[in-house]
C-alpha cells in the first residue's frame, strides 16, 4: 500500500515565507531556509517551494535560494514559479530540486509538459493547478454539479480552461503529478475542497496533491479517505506551529491511514 504524504509548502515572496487567505492578505511567516530546516527535522515527506510572484513579474525563480535550501534538507524538494522553458527546469534540477512545478507556462505552452517529461522523466514534472469554483447547480435535486476554472499568474488571471479537463490533458501530456490548490479554500482552515479533489482524482491516473484549507487533523483524514488524494499539502498550520508533521502522521496512523513515520 502506498503511504500518504504530508507536505509543507513555502510560498515565497521577496525571499520570505508568506501566507494569506484565498491568495490575498499575505503575511510574513519566516526565513525560508530556517523554516525548511524545521520541516526536514520533523521528517516531512516532501517540501514544496513556490515563488508566487515570479510568473506575474515575468522573472526567474530565486535559484540561489533554491540551491541554499536544497543543500540543507534531505527530503524530496519541489520548486515552482517563473518556469518558462526547458532551460529553467534544467537549472532548477541542477540547483538541487527533485521536481519542478509548472503552472502558468504549462497553460500557455502545453508542449512544455510533454517536452520536459520526455527529457527529464515524468516523475519530476508536477503540473500545478489553481482552481476556483465558477458554477454550482443542483441536478434534478439529486446531486450538485460543480465547475471549476483554472487561474494562472499566482491566482491573478482567469483562463477559459475547465479544471477537470485541464487536469486530464496535463496527465495525457506526461505530467507525473497534479498539485491541486483550491483558491476558494486556501488559508481558510475550513478543510480541503473534497468535491474538487475527488473530481480530479477520479479524472486522472497520476497522484494528486490536495492543497488549500487544512486547519485540523481531521481535514487530512477526510481528504485521503473521502477524496482519495495521494498527499495533503498545508502551510499556515505548520508555519505557525499549530500542528507538527508528526502529529498529523500519528493521527492518521491511529485511524488506519498508511503514512511513513
Image: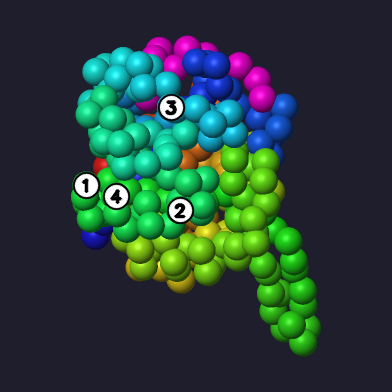
Q: Earlier in the sequence, mark 1 or mark 3?
A: 3
| Identity of the residue drawn at 27% across and 46% down | 124
How many numbered marks have been drawn onto this rendered protein structure?
4
Q: Mark 2 or 3, which is nearer the eye? A: 2
Q: Secondary structure at mark 3?
A: loop
Above-or-below relation of 205 to 191: below
Q: Identify the residue position indicated by label 4 in the image.
A: 116
Q: Position of residue 19 (x, y in %)?
A: 60, 27
Pointer 3 local density, CA inside 10 Å: few below 14, some 14–19, many at least 20? many
Residue designated by label 1: 120
On residue 109, which mark appears? 2
**Could you tell me residue 56's position as x and y percent?**
59, 34
Q: Is residue 234 above or below residue 177?
A: above
Discs 1, 4 touching: Cβ within 8 Å: yes
User: Could you tell me which secondary element the residue under label 2 belongs to?
Assistant: loop
**Picture coordinates of residue 261 (x, y %)?**
27, 38
Amino acid at each position: 500500500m502506498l503511504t500518504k504524504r504530508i507536505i509543507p509548502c513555502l510560498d515565497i515572496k521577496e525571499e520570505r515565507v508568506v501566507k494569506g487567505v484565498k491568495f490575498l492578505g499575505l503575511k510574513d511567516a519566516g526565513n525560508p531556509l530556517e523554516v525548511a530546516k524545521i520541516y526536514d527535522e520533523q521528517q516531512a515527506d516532501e517540501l514544496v517551494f513556490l515563488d508566487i510572484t515570479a510568473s506575474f513579474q515575468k522573472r526567474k525563480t530565486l535559484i540561489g535560494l533554491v540551491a541554499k535550501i536544497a543543500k540543507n534538507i534531505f527530503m524530496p524538494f519541489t520548486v515552482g514559479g517563473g518556469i518558462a522553458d526547458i532551460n529553467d527546469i534544467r537549472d532548477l534540477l541542477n540547483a538541487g530540486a527533485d521536481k519542478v512545478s509548472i503552472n502558468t507556462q504549462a497553460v500557455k505552452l502545453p508542449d512544455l509538459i510533454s517536452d520536459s517529461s520526455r527529457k527529464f522523466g515524468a516523475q519530476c514534472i508536477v503540473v500545478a493547478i489553481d482552481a476556483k469554483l465558477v458554477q454550482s447547480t443542483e441536478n434534478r435535486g439529486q446531486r450538485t454539479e460543480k465547475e471549476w476554472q483554472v487561474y494562472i499568474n499566482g491566482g491573478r488571471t482567469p483562463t477559459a480552461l475547465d479544471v477537470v479537463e485541464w487536469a486530464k490533458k496535463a496527465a495525457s501530456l506526461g505530467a507525473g503529478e497534479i498539485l491541486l490548490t483550491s483558491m476558494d479554500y486556501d488559508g481558510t482552515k475550513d478543510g480541503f475542497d473534497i468535491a474538487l479533489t475527488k473530481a480530479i482524482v477520479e479524472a486522472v491516473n497520476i497522484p494528486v496533491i490536495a492543497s488549500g484549507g487544512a486547519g485540523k487533523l481531521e481535514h487530512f483524514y477526510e481528504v485521503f479517505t473521502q477524496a482519495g488524494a495521494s498527499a495533503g499539502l498545508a502551510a499556515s498550520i505548520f508555519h505557525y506551529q499549530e500542528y507538527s508533521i508528526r502529529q498529523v502522521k500519528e493521527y492518521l496512523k491511529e485511524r488506519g491511514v498508511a503514512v511513513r513515520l
